[in-house]
Image (spheres, grey):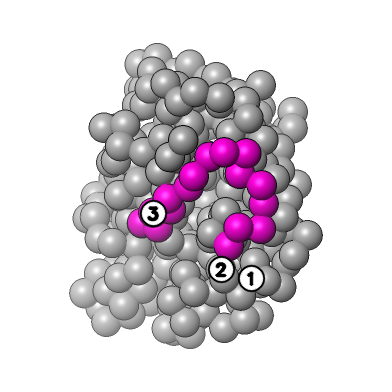
Amino acid sequence: MLIRLGHSSDPDDAFMVWALATGAVDTKGFVFRLFAEDIQTLNEWALRGHLEVTALSLAAYPLVQDRYVLLPHGASIGVGYGPIVVTQERLTLDQLRRTEILVPGRLTTAFLVLGLALGGPFEYREVRFDRIIEEVRSGRAEAGLLIHEGQLTYRAAGLEKSLDLGDWWLDETGMPLPLGVNVVRRDVPGIDVLSDVLRESIDAGLEHRDEALEYAREFGRGLEAGLADQFVSLYVNEMTRGYGEEGRRAVEELLHRAQAAGVYQDVRLEFVD
């Protein structure tokens, strides 16, 4: 059976699908066609049920929960780190509330958590994630919300970190920050077997780290080997192999807080067993 699988065009997601892309894992009869796109595009595709399996911002899951179910692996979860807001000169939280902030998409978890951190609606402008650093560096924008490898490369552009959402969330809740998840469409036959294949792909990448990293660097937009390794290490961890109790509690906490803030009407979490 053909499985169209979407992953974000950054090194950690690419690392997790290396084994599928190179035939390093038994796919048990599934044939995979991989799509690498920015996460906002994948979120928008999921609203239409475009792919059988896709990476997704956790913030978008309540919008597609009737069509997709959460896979128990493949999540990007930061422990004390996460998306950051950068500026030319460091700003306080109160100053950020009065500043237009470039964001990589309204459906991203980064956008959701920034709204929680700022305490409500804020002024923003949507820009593709890989253009935000240059927009702030050039002065065309005062602040930008960075996801993916921009969290590691902003200093080279002379920018300051004014807010780390993973650090804020940890102080607020004592929990890791769940950002990206993997989901499978509910109408796909053999979901349990497919889930096993996808988990084995993650395990294969970890067991053959050098080969998987070489593949992942192709999605790093010139990211040097050391930084690519560092970025993958941040977001491919034990909770990627399986959420565990801590990871699932963090997912519940974030979405329930968002529901209490009026972002969602009805959040129903369901994982593939």
Q: Residue furthest right?
A: 207
Nearest-to-viewer mark from 1 and 3: 3
Q: Which residue is mark 3?
A: 35
Q: Which residue was labeled with disc 1?
A: 213
Image coordinates of residue 34 in percent, x first then y, are 43, 53
* Rendered-image quadrant of the C terminus: top right
Marks 1/2 in contact by CB < 8 Å: the verdict is yes
Q: Which residue is mark 2?
A: 216
Q: Position of residue 137 (x, y in %)?
A: 33, 80
**Nearest to viewer (mark 2 / mark 3):** 3
Tell me the amino acid under the disc marked 1: Leu
Q: Is residue 118 visible?
A: no
**Mark 3 element type:** strand
Magenta residues?
22-38
Left or right: where does residue 164 sit relative to residue 201? left
Total number of numbered discs in the rendering: 3
Q: Is residue 196 highlighted in magenta?
A: no
- Mark 1 closeness class: few <14, some 14–19, many ≥20 residues within 10 Å: many
